[in-house]
Image (cartoon, rainbow, N blue to C red):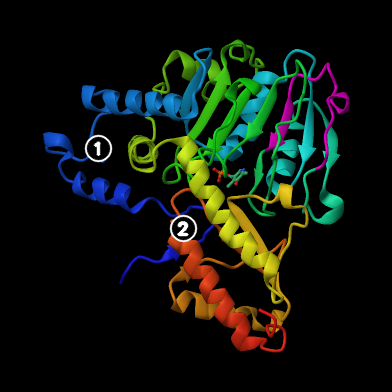
């Protein structure tokens, strides 16, 4: 079978050239006579891989020197606890903006460790927008402000980074990291599970400003203390070796094949334009996020005016090789996740299919197209 276009929200597609390199190096990595999966993480060969991965991430994202980069496990979900355990220790309080399920989970978990306040929420409209935030909305005494930068389920993202003054900004960037340049210096902590835009599931990237390390609560498990992993350079215990290796290949792909993060942004900009231009003009499919500036470039949820045809649409889509378009149950309809590795052809062909589907199933609506 040929490769399909996988529109899953995660785990998601990886660049084909990365998979090919990984396949060619599977049995014998660079003359080592073994696979990376089988190798000691303390070996010189592996040490070079993890160092190169960090160095590439620093280059691609232009991470300033006063930030540490950690490769951890436990997914973004573990960060929901790790962040408060390490940062909510000055005044014992933090501000949270609720823009979806993940943001709420982060808030709920952090509330177990201190006083969390909801600064703003978009739950009144099923999270289909990003609340407008002013500096005065935030508590200057808060130990940090937490946001979820891209809301994977609802298809919204922050077009502008909120100004929190001197309060460190912590952002879950699981589903938008590496999709376009981001000014790391505006954040205290950035964290992301890898399985959307970076690597297979199993590694979590944490980018943390140095001065925020070393203040964990006494109850913090050793494995949940950022200091542990800073001291051991992400090698306190066995790291997710293979995932980190794939991440290195993905970063090389961004640098060498795509041409850097600015080019990545241009590519993603074009892809989302094809998607949303079609949805805007379609009398049959509708995007679920009304405000254009809030629409995520990574996840595009949409509905159709004849919901009785949803099953048929998904079946036909799969027949043509467009996989995992079913929307999340809390939004319904459909969702096309078009992360970095989705080529523009994938979006163009999907839109072509959707156009044909609407003309065939709702000719009465499509006369003016
Ligand atoms: C997928 C996702 C998560 C959950 O990540 P895990 O690595 O599975 O814990 C958290 N936040 C956002 C924004 C996500 O998209």
- Most common secondary structure along the magenta stretch: loop
Q: Residue furthest front?
A: 368
Q: Does residue 101 sit above or below 65 in this rendering?
A: below
Residue that numbered label 1 is attached to: 36
Residue that numbered label 2 is attached to: 344
Q: Is residue 196 visible?
A: no
204 sits left or right of 287 in the view: left
Classify residue 305 by image quadrant.
bottom right
Q: In which quadrant of the rendered image does the C terminus lie?
A: bottom right
315 sits left or right of 161 in the view: left
Q: In which quadrant of the rendered image does the N terminus lie?
A: bottom left
Q: Does residue 76 sit above or below 359 in this rendering?
A: above
* Position in image of residue 86 (x %, y %): 64, 20
* Position in image of residue 179 (x %, y %): 53, 42
Residue that appears at 50% across and 62% down: 347
Q: Does residue 171 sit above or below 151 in this rendering?
A: above
Asked whether residue 142 is drawn in magenta, I would say yes
**Relative to the observer, which residue lies in front, 336 or 37?**
336
Q: Does residue 227 sit above or below 12 in this rendering?
A: above
Q: Which residues are magenta?
A: 131-148
16 sits left or right of 225 in the view: left
Asked whether residue 48 is drawn in magenta, I would say no
Q: Could you tell me how far apart the alpha carbons at marks 1 and 2 are, in whole angstroms?
A: 31 Å
């Amino acid at each position: 079978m040929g490769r399909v276009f996988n529109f899953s929200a995660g785990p998601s597609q990886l660049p084909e050239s990365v998979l090919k390199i990984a396949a060619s190096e599977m049995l014998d990595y660079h003359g080592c006579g073994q696979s990376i999966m089988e190798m000691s993480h303390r070996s010189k060969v592996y040490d070079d891989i993890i160092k190169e991965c960090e160095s590439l991430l620093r280059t691609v994202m232009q991470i300033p020197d006063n930030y540490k980069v950690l490769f951890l496990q436990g997914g973004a979900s573990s960060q929901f606890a790790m962040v408060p355990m390490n940062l909510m220790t000055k005044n014992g309080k933090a501000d949270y903006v609720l823009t979806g399920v993940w943001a709420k989970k982060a808030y709920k978990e952090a509330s177990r460790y201190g006083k969390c306040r909801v600064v703003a929420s978009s739950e009144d409209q099923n999270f289909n927008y990003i609340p407008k935030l002013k500096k005065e909305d935030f508590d200057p005494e808060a130990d940090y402000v937490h946001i979820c930068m891209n809301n994977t389920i609802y298809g919204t993202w922050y077009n502008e980074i909120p100004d929190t003054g001197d309060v460190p900004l912590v952002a879950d960037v699981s589903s938008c990291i590496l999709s376009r340049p981001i000014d790391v210096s505006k954040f205290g902590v950035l964290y992301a599970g890898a399985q959307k835009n970076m690597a297979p599931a199993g590694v979590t990237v944490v980018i943390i400003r140095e001065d925020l390390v070393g203040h964990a609560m006494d109850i913090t498990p050793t494995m949940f203390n950022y200091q542990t992993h800073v001291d051991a350079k992400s090698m306190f215990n066995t790291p997710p070796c293979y995932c980190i290796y794939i991440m290195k290949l993905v970063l090389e792909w961004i640098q060498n094949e795509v041409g850097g993060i600015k080019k990545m942004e241009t590519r993603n900009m074009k892809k989302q334009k094809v998607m949303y231009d079609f949805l805007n003009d379609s009398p049959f499919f509708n995007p679920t996020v009304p405000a254009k500036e809030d629409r995520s470039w990574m996840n595009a949820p949409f509905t159709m005016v004849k919901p009785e045809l949803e099953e048929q649409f998904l079946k036909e889509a799969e027949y043509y090789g467009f996989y995992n378009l079913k929307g999340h149950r809390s939004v319904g309809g459909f969702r096309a996740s078009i992360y970095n590795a989705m080529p523009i052809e994938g979006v163009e062909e999907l839109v072509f299919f959707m156009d044909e589907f609407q003309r065939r199933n709702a000719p009465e609506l499509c006369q003016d197209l």
